[in-house]
Image (cartoon, helix red, strand yellow):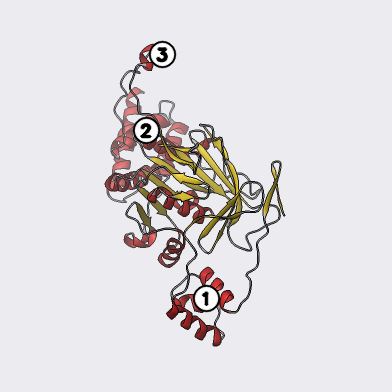
Amino acid sequence: MADHKQEFLNTLRCDAQESKDHFHMKFDDYVKKGLSRLIRDWQSQFPDAPTYEEGRAVVEEVYGLRLPKPAPAVVTNTRDFAKKEVKEPEVMLEVAGSESPVIHHPSLGEVHAFRGVGKTNFTIGFCNALATGSEFLCYKATRPFNCIYVDGEMDAGDMQEQLGILAEENENFNLITRCEQQNEFMPSIATAEGLAWYEEAINRSKAEVVVFDNWSRLANIGTNDEDSFFQFTDWCVRMRLRGVTVIYLHHDGKDKHTQRGHSKPEDPLNWVIGLRWSGDYKGQEGLKCVLEFEKARKPIYEFSKISLELSDGVWCWGKDKAITPTTGRPPIEATEEQKEQLKALVAEGKGERTIAKEIGISRDLARRWKAELLGKKEPQQADITFDGDKETKA
């Protein structure tokens, strides 16, 4: 009977090799489809069939993923450990003015919100501050950090427009976008092969911070596929040990307060930011929400919960009462030539979309310039106030 098990494993090795070489099947696809099927069939017929773990080990060898046997565990007492020279985590984001720490580097973080709240806009602004060492809302980056922003869904035009509004042109702000990849292909961050692809880019660009926007689009798996999510979080932990901060964006479920799927992948995270609309607001007037640190391994003593708005590229924030403009790029004013273009287009009855396209500006800016030309006051957004832990509209 013992010979049967080895015979089965040899058959599995040949099958996996053929699937890899001739059918170009990926490791994860083979494990989910071919391996489970073969092991299940064998076990139903023969008592000495190999276990799933034994079969997977053979497939990992075929795909070159089998790790060597780990060395014996290192055991250290607290006295010796206290004498070790270790690198202290660096403060990456602090409160502007008071220098109270907010986020450390390296760390693992998540930004989650319901669709349409403004995850991408918020994170581009945040990443811009890290890349330039500048202020963002009530926070400030302690120095410029080399960042990579991985976007899995926006087309080139939308990305250029958003960056033009929310970020400065900077060598520290790097992009991996679908539109620039060969055949518009980006591998899944839920697979070992995909993570190796991104890791090579991180190493090549010497990135200190990597942002994945977003888990749903870049992983492209079922919401509750725990094994794939765990593979990603294990990789994140390894990157943190190497000195890289990893941030990923995630969608909230239908309750609009908690992330889609299970919560176990959040366990290794250092911090979690939740963005949500206030009261009955549903995004009709642009990005306007409440930011709250829902998890922080290191205490955040100031501004762990604020309200924020984005208007014409200017970030506004507040803690208790009406939000007021503070940081962000200054409002863009029209040149004389642009003013003449604007007058002509408005006289022709053109809408904001056409005005934006003809002048080469964003639709938000076209709306503001048009309102200023016509002497109209733009609609005011309701202020956000706090009543204990409950937000209301003033």
| Quadrant in which residue 38 is drawn | top left
Q: Does dot 3 land on a helix, a strand or a loop?
A: helix
Element class at badge 1? helix
Q: Amino acid at mark 1?
A: Arg
Q: Quadrant of residue 316?
A: bottom right
Where does the image place residue 383, in percent across and percent down from the top left? 67, 56
Q: Residue at x 48, y 51 (%)?
A: 123
- What is the CA distance from the residue labelled 2 to the residue labelled 3? 21 Å
Tell me which numbered mark, 2 or 3, is placed earlier along the sequence: 3
Residue 79 sits above or below residue 347 on the image: above
The number of numbered badges drawn on the structure is 3
Pointer 2 residue: 241
Q: How far across and down, in percent of the image, does residue 58 sit?
A: 32, 33
The residue beneath circle 1 is 353
**Residue picked out by circle 3:** 78
Q: Nearer the viewer, mark 2 or mark 1?
A: 1
